[in-house]
Image (cartoon, rainbow, N blue to C red):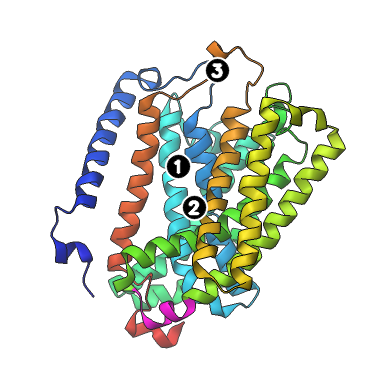
Amino acid sequence: MHDANTKNGLFTPGNIITGIILAVGAVITFIRFTQGIGAVSNLSDNNPWGIWIGFDLLCGVALAAGGYVTSASCYLFGMKRYHSAVRPAITTAFLGYFFVVVALHYDLGHPLRLPYPLVLSQGTTSLLFEVGLCVATYLTVLFVEWSPAALEWLGLRKIRNVVVKLTIMLTIFGVVLSTLHQSSLGALFLIAPGKLHPLWYSSFLPVFFFVSSMVAGLSMVIFEGTLAHAGLHHKMDETHLKEAEGVIFGFGKAASFVLAGYFFIKTMDIAMDNDWAYLGTGFGAWFLVEMFGFVALPSFLYALGVREKNVTLVRIASINAVLGIVMNRFNVSLVAFNWNLPAADRYFPHWMEIGVSVFIVTLIITVYRFIATRMPVLYEHPDYKDAH
């Protein structure tokens, strides 16, 4: 199997665009770490968290949930028909979490102090401490879960066999850790009831974040699979291609149910807090766009696509749902946050902040492509087919 880049030459349009993005990102990175966070961001005392938290952290962690969702489906619930989706999902999750940690260095005023809460000043009653501890531990778990692909590539059979025996334990550990930090990211906003708009503020924010992370995980597996089939089809073996449709319909069906449940509990929350009056405002209209356009609609499209066995419709629903997760995290952390401040004091990201986020996403795609074209991620290694 050969990489498409090798066939078409190094200077393809995609590679040129990637190179430009990485070069600009490197320059912004240099400015950030030599001139400080103020030189590349519009962050302030009113808005200490910007797009690096809203997108790189909140969206990044949610969209990397495909790892725990897929491994739990296959190894804990016995759905072996989804086995071919596990390695791509774990690889994406590992890279997602790794680059979330990389992105956090940009956001911290003193980036070298990232490990401080774990080693010097533990605030064990702090949600941020819990999030940091869980993300650091889960990143380690994901690395071990992902490592068999690298070990097979390197030919280290004995170490690979030891790691594979830990699969069930690692999967359970991963689900527990994901439950903790996915919900805790929502809980971070519980301390700001006066800053977050009532339509998005809720005492059930931890539940909303966790349930929506399941939607994100299921949808990202379908979305990633779509991109992989378009760009890395030549790396897929017969098993992966044969099981792909089953993964799409199975995960689409699950996502439809979870989205419907999410819509229901969000509606119940509006009723419990009696926030109906806010729906007649500008923020209310935007909330309804999120709920009907990016929760109810993808739920319906998933259900229709699965019933009609329409792969294209399910893939469209996955894009719709992924955009909905991004929209929700942006609404909670940016759009509906500090909603009562004058327009002049509201936050809008500096172009360099956006540049860093694009840089991080491009790095994830580049590293994933490097791994998937060289390691047994989208296919089974011929020497280990009987060992799976």
Residue under pointer 1: 101
> Label 2, on which residue?
139
- The amino acid type found where label 2 is placed reads Leu
Within the magenta stretch, is there residue 48? no
Mark 3 = which residue?
A: 346
Residue drawn where x is 57% and y is 29% of the image: 334
The residue drawn where x is 50% and y is 45% is 60
Labels 1 and 2 touching (C-beta < 8 A): yes
Q: Does the magenta stretch include residue 241?
A: yes
In screen coordinates, is 256 left or right of 90?
Answer: right
**What are the residue bounds of the magenta stretch?**
236-243
Which residue is nearer to you in this view: 110 or 330? Answer: 330
Q: What residue type is labelled 1?
A: Val
How busy is the neighbourhood of tag 1: few (under 14 within 10 Å), some, or many (20 plus)? some
Instruction: State the CA–CA distance, disc 1 to disc 3.
Output: 27 Å
Q: Can residue 78 be seen in this view?
A: yes
Q: Which amino acid does label 3 sit on?
A: Arg
Judge depth for marks 2 and 3 and give the one in front: 3
